[in-house]
Amino acid sequence: MRRAGPDDAAPLAALKLACFRETFLEDLGVPYPPEDLARFEAEAYGVDTVASELADPAHATWVCESSSGGLIAYAHAGPCKLPHPEVTDGSGELYQLYVRRGHQGKGLGGGLLSSALGWLGEHYPGPVWLGVWSGNDRAQAVYAAAGFRKVGDYLFRVGDHQDEEYILRRD
């Protein structure tokens, strides 16, 4: 595991897209309208978007590589942007934590979570926030085991489609 840098933008964008598709399309079977899905994927996982995130000092991303050097897992954190009345300017958020299906169960997710929580604790005083899809019971269980609890919900846009998301907080 290591911090991602500017040279990781293209492979990280590909990893983010692959993880999103594995999780939401293949594993959870969310029926996104094709035009909404295409727009969301281009906006959220484009190389320029990922490069901008990597260049932003308010954000941090960690990656795990396979023995062959390909990226297989990542976590991304930064300032909280969730719509909850208790979020303050100093609040941090775990935006994403994903491990490719074939590499799950090996401790990579726990290591990434630990790194992200440590960094958030150093850079953002107060609780740590995250959003999780209401239908992703597995992720919710992982976060509950790490001390997160549900404190609200909101609608997350995938194009014009809206997913019901839970807002979780760890104090």
Image (tube, helix red, strand yellow):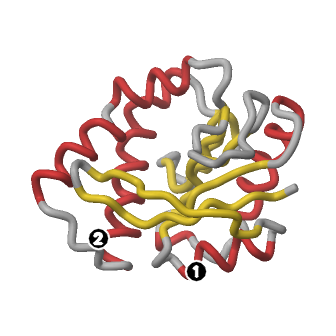
The picture places residue 132, in percent across and down from the top left corner, at: 55, 64
Q: Residue at x 83, y 68 (%)?
A: 147
Label 2 packing within 10 angstroms: few (<14), some (14-19), many (20+): some
Image quarter hosting the C terminus: bottom right
Q: Residue at x 23, y 48 (%)?
A: 159
Q: Is residue 159 above or below residue 167?
A: above
- Mark closest to the chain's N terminus, 1 or 2: 2
Residue closest to the eye, 164 or 14:
164
Amino acid on which disc 1 is placed? Arg
The circle on residue 98 is: none
Q: Residue at x 74, y 56 (%)?
A: 113
Q: Residue furthest left?
A: 35
Q: Residue at x 58, y 49 (%)?
A: 74
The picture places residue 59, in percent across and down from the top left corner, at: 64, 29
Which of the 4 image quarters holds residue 108?
Answer: bottom right
Q: Is residue 38 above or below residue 43?
A: below
Does 102 sit left or right of 37 as displayed?
right
Q: Is residue 164 above or below residue 87?
A: below
Disc 1 to disc 2, how far (Cα)? Answer: 15 Å
The picture places residue 17, in percent across and down from the top left corner, at: 34, 50
Residue closest to the eye, 66 or 169:
169
Does 16 sit left or right of 104 as displayed?
left
Q: Is residue 168 above or below residue 137?
A: above
Amino acid on which disc 2 is placed? Leu
Residue named by callout 1: 138
Q: Residue furthest front?
A: 85
The circle on residue 25 is: 2
Which of the 4 image quarters holds residue 93?
Answer: top right
- Is label 1 in a helix, a strand or a loop? helix
